[in-house]
Image (spheres, rainbow, N blue to C red):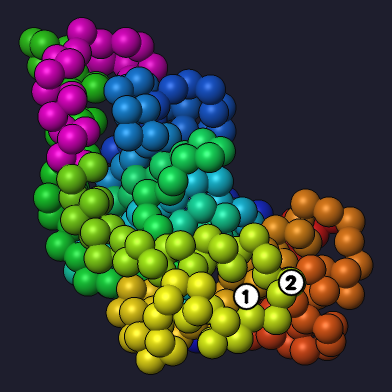
Amino acid sequence: MRRSDQNLSETDIRSPHAEVSMVRADAEDTRTWLTSAPVCPELNRYRIRHLAVAHMPSPFKIVRTRLGGSYFLACFGGEGCVLVDGRWIKCEPGHAVLLPPGTLHAFHTKPGRSWDFCWVRYQERSGQQPLTSAQTPVIAEFDSEGLRLAILGLFHECTASKDGIEIDPRETPQVDSLAIGRWIDLVQHYVLRFVAPTRLDPRIWQLWEKVAVSLDQPWSITEMANVVHLSEKQLQRLCLKDLGRSPRQQLIWLRMRRAAELLVERRCKIETIASRVGYKNPFVFSTTFKRVMGWSPSDYPGRL
């Protein structure tokens, strides 16, 4: 793992030799890399915006400063890197990463290398519970073969007419709606297979929902444990089990994520933002933000 020491801004670099089999929910998004993908409204049933199987040789680098929905990426060949908690994490075959809404979305293929992966991009609407109750990025082992084949099966149904003749993906083919529905169900099944361990104990979910709306308060481990009627040791154990973080580490992450949102949304001074997320000392806040997010508050991408 290597900490990111560079300022990240909105980036979209794709090799002309990239190979992508992609399907999208609608034609509203007119970005160049999406326009050739066939449209499948049935994806909206699971709030999926688009999904794909991709072969991405270098140069390839994507940075989205504020991910609007959950994003799932599973590697089945080559090697790439994903930014998680301010560190570039190597993503190899047999591994997947889940980025919850509101997190930075950044990954790239190493120079001279290729990366083979599939992705599923969700778009949760305001007020909807996201794909995962984990509020931090998750990277873990995952067998992507079933997901890869399901996406390719869906792509085939959306791009081929009933007699097997290839059509223009921008046109609406005579599709087999039953087959399409089953492929999409399989896609969701495989993603949820990865997501299941990240679903929190209800008590932990309740705690962090309450903490998230009062991040300016001086939360202590004792106070957090009392909220959900647990001992400090029980809270510590459940947080490590469900989140892979101690309660203190999770509190810091939530504060830094909220600070990142404020940096983008509002023209606030660093001192004001520090206070709103529970830091009386702006220097301590800035140091913590740099350590967790990978860059200083003043250099955060999208800062107004």
**Which label's residue is closer to the chain start, 1 or 2?**
2
Which is closer to the viewer, label 1 or label 2?
Answer: 2
Q: Callout 2: 10 Å neighbours few (<14), some, many (20+)?
A: some
Q: Callout 1: 10 Å neighbours few (<14), some, many (20+)?
A: many
Specify the amino acid type for callout 1: Met
Between 173 and 258, the residue placed more toward the observer is 258
Q: Is residue 179 magenta?
A: yes
- Is 211 placed above or below 6 here? above
Report the residue at 23% width, 42% height from top: 188
x and y, in percent, of residue 61 in the image: 52, 60
Q: Mark 2 sits on what residue?
A: 216
Mark-to-mark CA distance, 1 and 2: 19 Å
The reply, left or right, for residue 32 in relation to residue 47 is: right
Report the residue at 18% width, 35% height from top: 185
Toward which corner of the image does residue 160 lie, by quadrant?
top left
Report the residue at 14% width, 15% height from top: 176
Q: Mark 1 sits on what residue?
A: 293
The C terminus - image quarter: bottom right
Report the residue at 18% width, 45% height from top: 189
Specify the amino acid type for callout 2: Asp
x and y, in percent, of residue 24 in the image: 38, 30
Residue 240 seen in this snapshot:
no
What residue range appears in magenta? 165-187
Look at the numbered disc 2 and give the secondary structure of its residue: loop
Q: Which numbered marker is on residue 94?
A: none
The N terminus - image quarter: bottom left
Look at the numbered disc 1 and give the secondary structure of its residue: helix
Between 213 and 30, the residue placed more toward the observer is 213
The reply, left or right, for residue 33 in relation to residue 48 is: right
Q: Is residue 114 magenta?
A: no
